[in-house]
Image (spheres, rainbow, N blue to C red):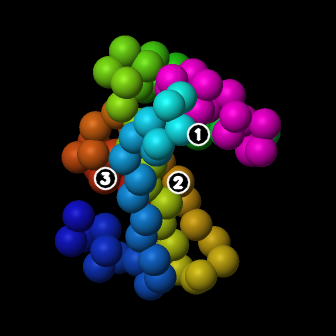
Amino acid sequence: MKELIKKCKCGVYIEVNNHKNNYQSVEEYFKELSEIREDLFKEISEDIYKEMIERDSVIEIQYYPNTPVGFHRVYHYDLNEAIKLTK
């Protein structure tokens, strides 16, 4: 986590199980998100998506490595693995 924060010149945001705030399943949450972000499923491998459903766990990291405008986003079911996937 410290390394991720150190390499970002701007913010780092982590959401854990945001779908549960609205009593949604993982599938419902991503269906709703995909209506807003058409390329959402390009960001998530099928294996990771299936495991998020199985574990009922969604970790989202959005981070700004260079500017406050350009960001990257990672989805996973495990926080440590999500951090490893940050570039």
Q: Quadrant of residue 56?
A: top left
Let me know if residue 34 is in the magenta part: yes
Q: Secondary structure at mark 1?
A: loop
| Location of residue 61 in the rendering, given as x and y in whole percent from the top left corner | 43, 55
Q: Secondary structure at mark 3?
A: helix
Q: Quadrant of residue 67?
A: bottom right
- Above or below residue 11? Residue 52 is above
Amino acid at pointer 2: Arg
Residue under label 3, please give it.
83
Mark 1 crowdedness (10 Å alpha carbons): few <14, some 14-19, many ≥20:
few
Let me know if residue 8 is in the magenta part: no
> What span is colored magenta in the figure?
25-37
- Above or below residue 36? Residue 44 is above
Amino acid at pointer 3: Ile
Q: Earlier in the sequence, mark 1 or mark 3?
A: 1
Mark 3 crowdedness (10 Å alpha carbons): few <14, some 14-19, many ≥20:
some
The residues tagged by marks 1 and 3 sit, at their Cα atoms, a distance apart of 15 Å
